[in-house]
């Protein structure tokens, strides 16, 4: 086995978490040769001789055989990762946006260069879902993968549920506690979990989608009224990413708030935790639960990938070669709750069937079945009007 010589990009939350882990797992033969960071003036917890501000110091160094990319900018990450692979270096990354937006091309580059390109930490932090979908569920007939893929939004929804507080109040608190970014759009708008769902779909079904092919409704519209409604039914509201098999050759993928009943394993996934339920023909239902973020939990997934490069592991994307025409469909009927203020919203949305209506006390809602395509067509209208759409699980 070649000794591992690591060039680390990024020394923020995950980079430092990984460094700590490598320091405390001395049995693992790896040396961080150099750490490349961005800001020259930032104080560092290690001697400055460990750092560089010039990516070439890592990329040009033939001694470095593994690049671990943990920076917070997807475009810069893409440039680093592709250059590292072109130079014959293995790559481990946690950058879901970069992976989701360029997956097909990155896989091709990995194959062309004969290197490993691994990204377990990009989806649900410490939960080993990618390698399981790729290897363990290699031949299983998967019915669905659904889960809570974003810790910040789950933290906000849990607080709204426990305290009956308004979305804006809880968001501000989550930002103060560091559970939400100062610009929270990627999380609360559902973009971050959509990147993760895009990646999970590639490993669950072999279908490489563009993130924007998947409808993502975030949690910005969830109100205290919606939470009260859920409570009265004994449910919680969770932001759920879901991909399911429909028949032999179609899958449906979407991300939206869902009502989750106590019997659903996702019901007990609270605070910043993540959870994934995998349902398959023979193994039946299996539930993965763990920390989806944080330096050490995410660093642990990065370490697992680093270790996998030492035995030449690569994702095989075997399902991609076997999919035989499996396609994404948006022609799927969902049971949803729609809370709205302006009647015009309801008039624009063509429900297949409305089975419950409520008007009064400043709360208007309907429950009924609607085609996913209708939600996609009306996404902007729904957002502008402040209406909330929540799927019934
Ligand atoms: N945080 C989590 O819990 C978590 C969980 C799963 C996945 N991830 C993913 O892990 C990655 C890192 O996240 P993070 O939370 O650790 O970010 P972070 O705390 O914001 O740290 C980012 C680091 O990247 C460095 N950096 C930025 N641009 C750079 C460049 N062009 N060249 C070299 N270094 C650069 C920064 O340098 P300075 O130190 O000089 O500012 C900083 O050290 C992201 O892709 C994120 O999506 C994070």
Image: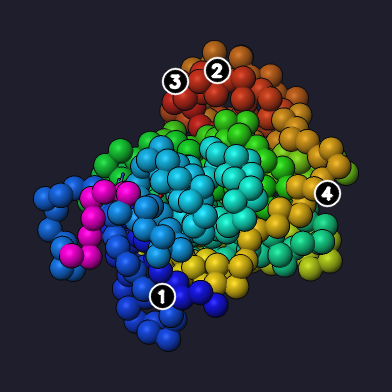
> Is the residue under label 1 in contact with that under label 2 (CB below 8 Å)?
no
Q: Nearer the viewer, residue 5 or 42?
A: 5
Alpha carbon distance from label 4 to label 1: 36 Å
Look at mark 4 in the image and give the residue it sits on. 322
How far across and down, in percent of the image, does residue 168 sit?
Answer: 31, 39
Q: Is residue 120 placed above or below 80 in the rendered structure?
A: below
Q: Nearer the viewer, residue 305 or 358?
A: 305
- Mark 4 falls on what kind of element? helix
How far across and down, in percent of the image, does residue 225 sit?
Answer: 44, 39
The numbered mark, 2 or 3, whose residue comes first in the sequence reads: 2
Q: Is residue 325 placed above or below 371 in the rendered structure?
A: below
Look at mark 3 in the image and give the residue it sits on. 384
> Is the residue under label 1 in contact with that under label 4 (CB below 8 Å)?
no
How far across and down, in percent of the image, does residue 46 sit?
Answer: 18, 68
Alpha carbon distance from label 2 to label 4: 42 Å
Q: Is residue 222 placed above or below 306 in the rendered structure?
A: above
Instruction: Residue 52: say if magenta.
Output: yes
Side (left or right) of 131 relative to 183: right
Q: Nearer the viewer, mark 3 or mark 4?
A: 4
Look at mark 1 in the image and give the residue it sits on. 30
Q: What range is drawn magenta here? A: 49-56
Residue 66 visible in the snapshot: yes
Side (left or right) of 229 relative to 152: right
Q: Is residue 373 placed above or below 214 in the rendered structure?
A: above
- Mark 3 falls on what kind of element? helix
Res 345 label: 2
Identify the image's colour scheme: rainbow, by chain, secondary structure or one colour. rainbow
The numbered mark, 4 or 1, whose residue comes first in the sequence reads: 1
Label 1 crowd (10 A; few <14 / some 14-19 / many >=20): some
The numbered mark, 3 or 1, whose residue comes first in the sequence reads: 1
- Mark 2 falls on what kind of element? helix
């Amino acid at each position: 086995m070649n000794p591992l010589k690591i060039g680390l990009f990024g020394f923020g939350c995950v980079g430092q978490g990984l460094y700590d882990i490598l320091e405390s797992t001395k049995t693992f033969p790896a040396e961080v040769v150099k750490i490349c960071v961005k800001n020259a003036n930032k104080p560092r917890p290690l001697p400055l001789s460990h750092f560089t501000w010039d990516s070439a110091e890592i990329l040009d160094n033939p001694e470095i055989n593994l690049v671990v990319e943990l920076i917070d900018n997807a475009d810069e990450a893409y440039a680093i990762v592709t250059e590292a692979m072109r130079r014959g270096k293995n790559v481990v990354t946690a950058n879901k946006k970069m992976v989701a937006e360029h997956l097909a091309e990155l896989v091709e580059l990995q194959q062309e260069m004969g290197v490993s390109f691994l990204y377990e930490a990009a989806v649900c932090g410490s939960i080993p879902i990618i390698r399981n979908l790729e290897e363990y569920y290699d031949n299983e007939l998967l019915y669905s993968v659904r889960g809570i893929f974003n810790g910040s939004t789950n933290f906000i929804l849990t607080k709204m549920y426990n305290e009956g507080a308004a979305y804006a109040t809880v968001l501000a608190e989550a930002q103060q506690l560091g559970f939400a970014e100062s610009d929270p759009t990627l999380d609360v708008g559902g973009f971050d979990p959509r990147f993760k769902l895009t990646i999970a779909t590639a490993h669950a079904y072999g279908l490489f989608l563009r993130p924007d092919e998947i409808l993502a409704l975030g949690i910005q519209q969830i109100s205290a009224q919606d939470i009260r409604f859920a409570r009265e039914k004994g449910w919680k509201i969770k932001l759920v990413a879901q991909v399911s098999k429909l028949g032999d050759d179609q899958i449906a993928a979407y991300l939206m708030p869902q009502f989750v009943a106590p019997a659903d394993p996702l019901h007990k996934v609270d605070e910043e935790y993540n959870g994934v339920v995998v349902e398959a023909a023979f193994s039946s239902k299996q539930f993965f639960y763990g920390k989806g973020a944080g330096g050490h939990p995410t660093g642990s997934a990065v370490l697992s990938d680093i270790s996998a490069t030492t035995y030449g592991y690569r994702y095989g994307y075997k399902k991609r070669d076997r999919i035989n025409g499996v396609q994404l469909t948006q022609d799927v009927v969902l049971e949803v709750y729609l809370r709205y203020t302006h009647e015009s919203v309801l008039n624009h949305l063509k429900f297949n069937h409305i089975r419950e209506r409520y008007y009064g006390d400043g709360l208007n809602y309907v429950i009924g079945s609607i085609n996913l395509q209708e939600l996609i067509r009306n996404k902007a209208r729904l957002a502008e009007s402040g209406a909330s759409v929540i799927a019934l699980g």
